[in-house]
Amino acid sequence: MVTTNLNPPSTTASTTFNLKSYLAKRATQVEAALDSSLPVVYPEQIYESMRYSLMAGGKRLRPILCLATCEMLGADSAIAMPTACALEMVHTMSLIHDDLPAMDNDDYRRGKLTNHKVYGEDVAVLAGDALLTYAFEYIATQTQGAQPQQVLKVIADLGKAVGANGLVGGQIVDLASEGKAIDEETLTYIHMHKTAALLEVSVTSAAILVGADVDVIERLRRYAQRIGLAFQIVDDVLDITATSEELGKSAGKDVAAQKATYPSLLGLEASKQKADQLIEAAIAELAGFGEAAQPLVAIAQYITARTH
Amino acid sequence: MVTTNLNPPSTTASTTFNLKSYLAKRATQVEAALDSSLPVVYPEQIYESMRYSLMAGGKRLRPILCLATCEMLGADSAIAMPTACALEMVHTMSLIHDDLPAMDNDDYRRGKLTNHKVYGEDVAVLAGDALLTYAFEYIATQTQGAQPQQVLKVIADLGKAVGANGLVGGQIVDLASEGKAIDEETLTYIHMHKTAALLEVSVTSAAILVGADVDVIERLRRYAQRIGLAFQIVDDVLDITATSEELGKSAGKDVAAQKATYPSLLGLEASKQKADQLIEAAIAELAGFGEAAQPLVAIAQYITARTH
């Protein structure tokens, strides 16, 4: 048997990995999949309201993490696309309901009027409910190339990540902590549930769909937990160190609201260090995946790069 | 082979079928299953809020239809119990969100303060979200004795029954119809989606879990659609003919609110006749199941019995 190797070694590519173009390409794919997931039919108003928020842009970080994990594990990302879309539907639901007058009472998100400002509070509540419901339905009906048992596990894990022991639990503790002095443990609980839980299922769901080992799933879980927490710490740091212009939103909001943050509990330098350590630990979990882990490594590095 | 028949023929039982005691026994089973489905853990407030509405009583009609169908088809009702609980979680979510100030703005339900009056609007929105999420998670994690593919189909059908093309779609059209003259087609759309869709999946889900034929599933679907619509017509009729004391709620509300109802569109007698015909047609769908269909037949008869 004669083996030829006329191509340059694949490690060459690692020096040229371009996160920005990777994210842009992936976001375009996700936008197209989301667009076709939800056609407008009768009764049009509810579909228009769902689409208004679902198609309102954003980084599409959760779907991209899901697709990138799928490919890192050597599978076709098409297996994970319905789950990737469902993650964005759930994330969108949480934003619509968060913005309601009874919650954060926000009039604008990403420079556009919030859902309830356009469609009314009643429709916004229902649009969130419908998106949340559709996320589970979409995974169940659209996933191809995975075992039914694995699809069920993804549905179960997504439910856990969103419900009272996940995203909703984090929001409840956050609401109960408003204007109160809280400790680091409570602050970490809030962020691990409000933010990290959905990032976690974004990567573990892809691993489950492709039939990865438990060890791989747990490595990915730790990766996501760490980047999720680091992301929040960096947000807290930027609220103090960045200008409003740099942030694209009001700076100093947390201090003004006397909100407990990592800098207020640990100090600014210790917070930056904690974020750096978390990112380093997150990347360490990916050591065994070699070059295939480039997108996930670069996404992790990007998080702390924002503070430097 | 010697066959003995010392027991009275089973048809004897049909003359003594007692719907009231059947419903009471089933409701007790469902209450126990719901109670153990949702223990209170940290953060307690969200679990207490979810439980407050989930355990607030009611007829438990959806879970009972699900369990009764399962047994009618010769299977152990334990297979359907997680789905039965999930149906009640979804129904409860729809009541919590319906009662919100932005929707129907109700202070009381079943003689108790509504969820948002006790826990606040923010927690009530989140309790609904968590119950809806938990419904899908609960089916995925707790169902035993069914094929994973069948469990996925139940999740998909439940999603369809609840989402923009189901319950939420019915609510949207109902909201959009307030204070407007609507035709019978629109009124039927509202009821088929707001009420019948969840009843439909209550019976079809049990049939799917036990691996019933498509023909059986379709018969059950038509049964549920017909009793669902009849139920609403009877509600409209009772709003005119019954006293508030008989109803246990204000009578004449629909007329006062100038709400389109079947009696306002078809007249009182034609409405009663339509309800009777629907119930007759619903029961006809069960002809092939013999005596095993007694509970479903009796539930259908009970609906129109209220007008006589």
Image (tube, coloured by chain):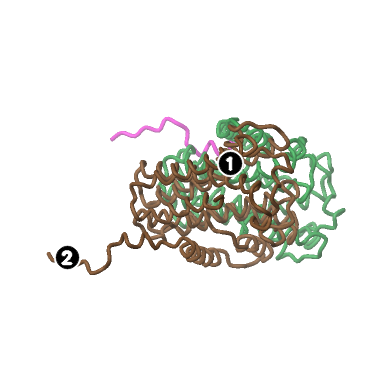
Chain colours: A green, B brown
Q: Is residue B174 left or right of residue B291?
A: right
Quarter occupied by the N terminus of chain B: bottom left
* Vertical side of B107 occupied by A308: above or below: above
Q: Amino acid at mark 1?
A: His
Whether residue A9 is in magenta: the answer is yes
User: Residue at image x 83%, y 60%?
Assistant: A179
Callout 2: SS: loop
Whether residue A155 is in magenta: the answer is no
State the residue position of label 2: B3
Mark 1 neighbour class, 10 Å CA radius: few under 14, some 14 to 19, many 20 or more: many
User: Residue at image x 73%, y 54%?
Assistant: A233
Going by the picture, which residue comes out furthest to the bottom?
B6
Q: Quadrant of residue A48?
A: top right
Q: Position of residue B230 (x, y in %)?
A: 53, 44
Q: Position of residue B225 (x, y in %)?
A: 49, 42
Q: Is residue A73 left or right of residue A232?
A: left
The residue stretch that appears in magenta? A1-18
Q: Amino acid at mark 2?
A: Thr
State the residue position of label 1: B191
Q: Are marks 2 and 1 in contact (CB under 8 Å)?
A: no
